[in-house]
Image (cartoon, rainbow, N blue to C red):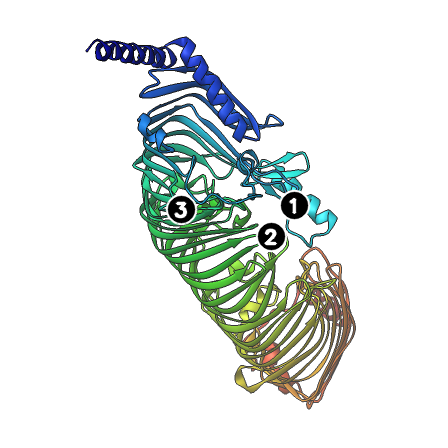
Amino acid sequence: MRRIYRLLVVLSAIVLLAVLAVWMFTNTDFGRERVRRLALDLLGGSTHGIVKIGAVHGNLLSGATFVDVSITDSAGRPFLKADSLTGRYVLRSFLSKKIYLDGLVLYRPQVVIEKLPGGQDWNYRRLWPQTKPTGPVDTLPGWGAWVRFTNVTVVDGDVVVRSPWSPRTGLSARVRDSVVKDALSDGSRLKIIAVPGGYQKVIELAKVDATLPLVRIADPAFKNRFLQVSGLRMQAYPFRPPAAQVQALAGNFEFNDDSLWWKGAAVRLPKSNLKGDGTYNIDNGDMRLAVGATPAAFDDFKWLYQRFPKEGGGNLGLSVVWKGATQDYVIREADVRTGGAHVQGDLGVSIADTTYFHDANLRFTGVTTKLIAELDPSLRSPRQGVLSGRAKFNGTPRRLDIADADVTFAVYGRGANRLQARGIVGFNGPKYVVSARDLRLRFLPLQIDIVKLLFPTLPIGGTLSGSLTLNGNGATQLVATGLDIMHQDGPNRSHAVGRAAVHTTGQPTLDLDVVAQPVALAELTKFAPALPLKGLATGPVHAHGPIDAMRMDTRLRLPGGGVFGLRGTIDFQSRELGYDVVADATALDLSRVMIGAPQTALTGGGTARGRGFKPATMLADLAFDFGPSTVDTLGVDSLTVRARLANGLANIERARVQASGGVAELSGQFGLDAAHQGALTYAVSVDSLGTFARFLPGLGPDTGVVQPRPRLAAELLRVARADSA
């Protein structure tokens, strides 16, 4: 019995000593320091870097708090730094080689996931490399086979991902330097930094507060790792500021060494709710997202595009694909509003070295030019107004394939423009030079005010309606075929069909081959105000050359059956119209085509060379010969004029009129305005004044008495007195 008693006493003493040893090892500063050093030895032995733990606190039988924890690589580049890590555990899990921690709390953790340029591996792989076994492989799970954290809390964390970046291959040295300069500038949305050996792209998740019910790092029963998020707040910086303000994130995420993926994750931004699936390739930064937004507020997405408006938003589906240097964004079934603008439909945009639009099918109303300029200052319009309509297109700004477009542009105070288009159009260079291929345009209508943006001195107004097909390049030549255009300017209506081409190499020139059906002659008066034309004319019009030396060839049928032809060169650009032309007419009735002109039937022609039509300022050399013609009721057999008009004077070298009743010739000068005068010499030979009776009032019947002039009366009186003396 004594032996049993002594044995119990010895065992009790051993147990007491063991308890005292465990207590001293787990609940005293001495023991915690021993645990800290043991942890440093264990972690340092398996880590190809530097591990630091400032202190260990807590009851180590059930949990611990590690203070001032940091892990860096051998060069001192950071991987993890935290103010403290606190967790609870059950000792028996360690006995089965399982690392299970519950209630893990990380205060101010800072994590840097980095891959340096030059082919180096990610820092976490360099810290804990996977080595191939050199001997027999132990297939039984051991330490590290089970790692699980439950009820994890992250307080004020920060995660930075730095991956290698470089311009795409195939660029010249000059272009590559330009791309790098742009990427490093503050104007680049990607955050690119220069590091030894190259450049890195930086993504940051700042001020992270998270609740994670389960984090499974390793388990032989599962192929992938697992992260369950019940709540997460952060400021996400996938680009340069501003940040995406994530107020809540919840979802289940799976990941491995290379990738992270999820389904049905929900995100709440200040005014937006998102839900969707995605994958992220940790190795190269590639990403895929498929998100539904109900709703999405523009202001919540300024991190994606800084010029989004502050107000407005709506519902949409968004797909995002990042692959290498290419970013692709696709918006589906959008229904968004901002201010008075309303946009519906689909739009895809791929961004690499250039911007490519795809799957675009939009309907819009109330889109102002001010809003467009706010979204993209390079699209500032010379006319302010509101756009509405629809558009389906694909391609780049340099080559945009328009499947269907019907756009109305209501210019403030200047009327509405409606344009329908199908075909290919391009806008190149800083001045947006237009190119086109089989671009079919229809104007319903187009204000001449818009045309004046290209030809600011154009004197006409009104609208253009009709259609044409455009081909070519504004840098060399643009050709409009199938041209069928109606011009309406107040009561004046003109209609032309045919072909036109604009050559822009060197001095711009025009080739115009159309048929007027008809043309309103009053519109020509706006080019030459001194010619008060009226009426309509039909026939072919050919014009070739620069606008200041246009070669004209036309033959028009005029009201009353007359025909007028014109060949020569005209300067439409100068303030005073210039001309060097040959004209001919058949049965031309001036009263039908010119306000205030007499009734005529002129047949003949001649030349006119000069500038302007205002009598006081015009300069012209005229040479005309007409055959049998009629002026008013006077018939003439021939009419010849040779004259020079200059400096307010008409210098008549020769003017001859021959009619059946006589001949009249005239030469000399006369003034063209009140400030000038001259002297004329004329000779008239007539067979009978009766032919000209209507022009000579004194040849009518003598029905009255005319008193003689005083001088004549005095002379007659003097003669009578002399005779009677």
Residue wearing tag 3: 224
Is the residue 456 above or below the residue 33 in the image?
A: below
Q: Nearer the viewer, residue 54 or 671?
A: 54
Residue shown at the point (38%, 19%) measured from the top left: 65
Q: Amino acid at mark 2?
A: Asp
Q: Which callout, 2 or 3, points at the residue further toward the start of the chain?
A: 3
250 with respect to 408 (left or right): left
Which element is circle 2 on? Answer: loop
Q: Is residue 434 visible?
A: yes
Q: Name the mark on residue 353.
A: 2
Q: Amino acid at mark 3?
A: Asn
Q: Which callout, 1 or 2, points at the residue further toward the start of the chain?
A: 1
**What is the distance, in whole Å, between disc 2 and disc 3 at their CAs?**
36 Å
Q: Nearer the viewer, residue 569 or 619?
A: 569
Quarter of the image with the N terminus is top left
Q: Nearer the viewer, residue 28 or 8?
A: 8
Give x and y (percent) for residue 330: 43, 55
Quarter of the image with the C terminus is bottom right
In which image quadrant can residue 11 be found?
top left
